[in-house]
Image (cartoon, rainbow, N blue to C red):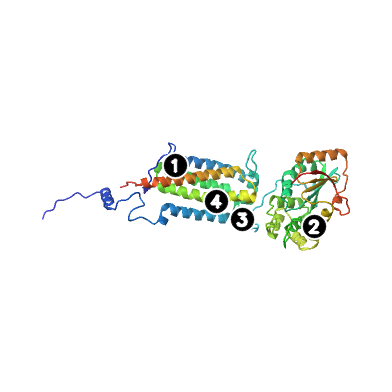
Amino acid sequence: MARAQQPTPSRRERRAAERLDRPARSGSRSGATKRPVWRSPLVLVTAAALAIGAGIVAFALPSGGSGDTALFSPSTSYAADLVDAESLGADGAPVVMELYADFQCPACKLFAKEQLPRLLDEFVAQGTLRIEARDIAFLGRGSRDESLELAAGARCAAQQDRYWQFHDYVFWNQGRENRGDHSEAFIARVAAAAGVEKAAFDGCLAGSDVRASITGQTQAALASGVSSTPTLIVNGQSIVGVPQYDQLAGLIRQLAAAGSPTSSPGDAASPDDAGPTNVVAQPS
Amino acid sequence: MRRSAVRPILGAHPGLILAVLDLAGLAIAAYLSVVELQGGVPVCGPIKGCEEVARSEYSRIGGVPVAVFGVALSLVLLTLAVAWWRTDLYVLLLAHYGLSLAGVIFEAYFMYLQIFVIGAVCIWCASYGVSLIARFVIALVVWLRGQPAAVDSARP
């Protein structure tokens, strides 16, 4: 029996016919063959993106003091001939500034970052000013006194004439107060970054003398009237808190013009001292 | 291969808008990368904070400045945006959406670090973050409103 020969439909025509046979859709995601919501491309891509984002964040998290990550790098450099343990500047400088600071004190950080470099350039390098660091530890709490540990680290760094580098690295990377941010690992990282020789540093820290000396210095400072940090004693005149730089610079110029220091370094921290004259009081 | 019927935004193809935002992000990230790799710090003008952020340990991942990853991300996003603009293949838009979302998550983390850990905000980084959020939102909105009009491309 002869059959009428029909033309073979093209692929496009077959697909069009198939579409007509399907149940009616509204949009591409509804109807009898609707995909579960969780299988929609948007949901799947969102989930993948969230996972990737979280993975990147997890990878980027600092390693918690392992020493693998870089610290803030202080911008100040110190000429070796100006550094003598915890002192900075020429011996015969007409102005001597004692700097009472606690390494956990945020205002001390501000002073260290904003004003110390300017003092260094404008007065210390010119032989006008010598700065004597007097680290005290009075902010520490709990079983591990982080202020004391940091000050002890600084004193051990001073034995290698790396005090100021250690000082700057601590303040540039200062963590939260008494929250464990200034761990042993942190101090080791700071010391390494400051160029301190590790074996001697560790040996120094292992001894009890260094902490006793910081504790003694703290008690002496408190007894002499230093109750807040930073406290600057400039040729015997006390400045509590972070001063305006111009105010401080003006005082240094005035004292330099007047001649030699009126008190020798360290006197103000002595319990026998009547205490410095408080000429400026600035809230920190 | 699915193509989306694209409705213009402000008279322009959204892919073109995404490409412009990607270019802006690329310029910011490239500037930060060059400065960081040369050991400098970005210029912030009267707005402080760039130096602190740039010198923080969080500004690098595995020793590589974060901005370098921003350059790579922006290049990929720019390629996707231009390709989508030229082809209307919606999978490219979806890829742009996904990658920009991953970037937004990292930016959110980085902004948290700047505000609560570093204590300083880098305006360049914030600008890059804003551009990334804009790209993510545009890609999402375009994808959502383009879905009902999706059609199969006719390829023999």
Q: Nearer the viewer, residue A5 or A219?
A: A219
Q: Return the residue at label 4.
A: B106
Which residue is at a point 45% across and 40% down the rendered structure image?
B16
Asked if the residues shown at circle 3 and circle 2 are in contact, with their CB atoms under 8 angstroms apart, the answer is: no
Asked if the residues shown at circle 1 and circle 3 are in contact, with their CB atoms under 8 angstroms apart, the answer is: no
Q: Within the image, what quadrant is residue A126 found in? A: top right
Q: Return the residue at label 3.
A: A62
Q: Secondary structure at mark 4?
A: helix
Q: Return the residue at label 2.
A: A214
Estimate the spatial distance between the alpha carbons at disc 1 and disc 4, rounded to whole Å. Answer: 23 Å
Chain to which the residue tagged by mark 1 belongs: B
Q: Are marks 4 and 3 on the same chain?
A: no
Residue B47 seen by the camera: yes
Which residue is at a point 40% across and 47% down the rendered structure image?
B90
Estimate the spatial distance between the alpha carbons at disc 3 and disc 2, rounded to whole Å. Answer: 31 Å
Estimate the spatial distance between the alpha carbons at disc 1 and disc 2, rounded to whole Å. Answer: 64 Å
Residue A42 locus on image (x, y percent): 43, 52
Estimate the spatial distance between the alpha carbons at disc 1 and disc 3, rounded to whole Å. Answer: 36 Å
Q: Are marks 1 and 3 on the same chain?
A: no
Q: Nearer the viewer, residue A263 or A203?
A: A263
Estimate the spatial distance between the alpha carbons at disc 4 and disc 2, rounded to whole Å. Answer: 43 Å
Residue A135 locus on image (x, y percent): 78, 53
Q: Quadrant of the N terminus of chain A?
A: bottom left
Which residue is at a point 70% across and 53% down the rendered structure image?
A193
Q: Residues within 10 Å of mark 2 (few under 14, many from 20)?
A: many
Q: Secondary structure at mark 3?
A: loop
Q: Nearer the viewer, mark 4 or mark 3?
A: 4
Chain to which the residue tagged by mark 3 belongs: A
Q: Secondary structure at mark 2?
A: helix
